Amino acid sequence: MRASPLALLLTAVLIAGCGGHGKSAKSNGEASKPPGRVLADARAAASSASSVHVSGRIVAGGTPITLDLDIANGKGAKGSMAPGGLQFDLVQIGDAAYIRGTDAFWQHYAGAGIAQLLHSRWVKVSTSEPRFRILAPLTSISLLFDKVAASHGKLTNEGTKSYEGQQVVEIRDTSHQNRLYVAATGKPFPMAIVVGEKSQSGTVTLGSWNKSVSLTAPKGAIDISKLGG
């Protein structure tokens, strides 16, 4: 499982908390399956979910990237992200994305003048525009999963392990030393992906599968197209 740091974050689809299954629950049989089959089962489970909570931190080239998002499959997402410590809040509904950055965020990406103008304000952008297209996968769990799982080396099924107090099946990418944890009981939701490469490291996790996510467009958002941006 190999992807760019930002893709790993946006595609936190690989990482999910299954929740509600104790150690005594009956095995779902994933521990005895070929690794490719487990990966496919995890993708199917994640893709069928109506929502998921994604959080994590990846360090790439010495730069930390964090995120904390609730994703409503096929509808949108809300939460926050912080590339290089420059945090912004996000609400995405369909093709429309609303961003509220910190002063430091706007100063870095748009300059002091724009930062002053947009202080504590929401900005509306379209994910159909090339520069904001990277946000589009946040509305599709299956697309996020595909972005993360599209490229990987040799996979091995390491069997049942304990992760964060829950029984999981560990799928290891021996070429890149990354690990995918999939629930070993109940529906085989992906639980976490741990990145252990030289160029990047970190963990992204998900939970709260299928819980209700309310998405509301912020009032008074500035349409960035009207700023000539």
Image (tube, rainbow, N blue to C red):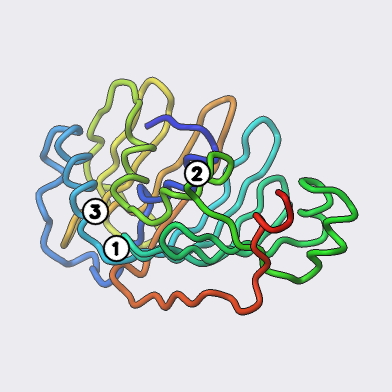
| Amino acid type, residue under disc 3 in the picture | Ser
Q: Mark 3 Cα within 10 Å, few/some/many (few <14, many 20+)?
A: some
Residue designated by label 2: 133
| Amino acid type, residue under disc 1 in the picture | Cys
Residue 8 place in picture, x, y as percent: 47, 41
In this rendering, the label closer to the viewer, 2 or 3: 2
Q: Mark 2 Cα within 10 Å, few/some/many (few <14, many 20+)?
A: few
**In terms of depth relative to the viewer, which is nearer, 179 or 129?**
129
Numbered tag placed on residue 225 in the rendering: none
**Element carrying mark 2:** helix
| Amino acid type, residue under disc 2 in the picture | Arg
**In terms of depth relative to the viewer, which is nearer, 225 or 195?**
225
**Element carrying mark 3:** helix
Query: Spatial distance from mark 1 to mark 2, Cα to Cα?
Result: 29 Å
In this rendering, the label closer to the viewer, 1 or 2: 2
Instruction: Examine the image and state in which quarter residue 77 appears.
Output: bottom left
Residue 97 place in picture, x, y as percent: 53, 60
Residue designated by label 3: 47
**Element carrying mark 1:** loop
Residue designated by label 1: 18
182, above or below 36, in the image: below
Query: Spatial distance from mark 3 to mark 1, Cα to Cα?
Result: 14 Å
